Image (tube, grey):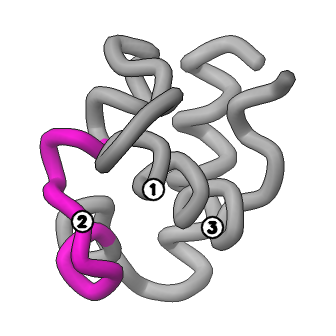
Amino acid sequence: MEKDQRKKIVAHKLVDIGESVTSWAAKNGLHQRIVADLLDGKLKGTRGVTLEARRKLEETFGPIFGS
């Protein structure tokens, strides 16, 4: 999935629940910068903290990273 599509999906779902990326990240115990970098495609989320963040993002927003 392209980063623009991913950002659009996340933005729509965040509006529906009335939160921002920063507030969602804080509520889920994640660093906002890691979440933003995952959404921008700067991080892959394959190990460690980034993998945990990716899993929480996909749990909330669905399969936004593709395979």
Q: Amino acid at mark 1?
A: Glu
Is 31 on the left or on the right of 45, as rendered? Answer: left
Where residue 23 sits, quadrant-wise, is: bottom left
Label 2 with label 1: CB-CB less than 8 Å: yes
Q: Main secondary structure of the magenta part?
A: helix
Mark 2 or 3, closer to the camera: 2
Kindly state the secondary structure of the residue where label 2 is placed.
loop
Label 3 with label 1: CB-CB less than 8 Å: no
Structural distance between the alpha carbons of marks 2 and 1? 9 Å
> Residue 67: image x %, image y %?
85, 23
Mark 2 or mark 3, earlier in chain: 3
Q: As displayed, is residue 63 above or below residue 39?
A: below
26 magenta-colored: yes
Q: As displayed, is residue 8 above or below residue 24?
A: above
Rendered image: mark on residue 13 = 3
Instruction: Sort mark 2 into few (<14), some (14-19) or many (20+) by Cα contacts within 10 Å.
Output: some
Rendered image: mark on residue 30 = 2
**Magenta span covers which residues?**
25-35
Q: Nearer the viewer, residue 45 or 1?
A: 45
Q: As displayed, is residue 28 above or below residue 21?
A: below
Where residue 19 sits, quadrant-wise, is: bottom left
Q: Nearer the viewer, residue 5 or 43?
A: 43
28 magenta-colored: yes
Q: Amino acid at mark 3?
A: Lys
Kindly state the secondary structure of the residue where label 3 is placed.
helix
Mark 2 or 1, closer to the camera: 1
Question: What residue does disc 1 label?
Answer: 52
Instruction: Sort mark 3 into few (<14), some (14-19) or many (20+) by Cα contacts within 10 Å.
Output: some
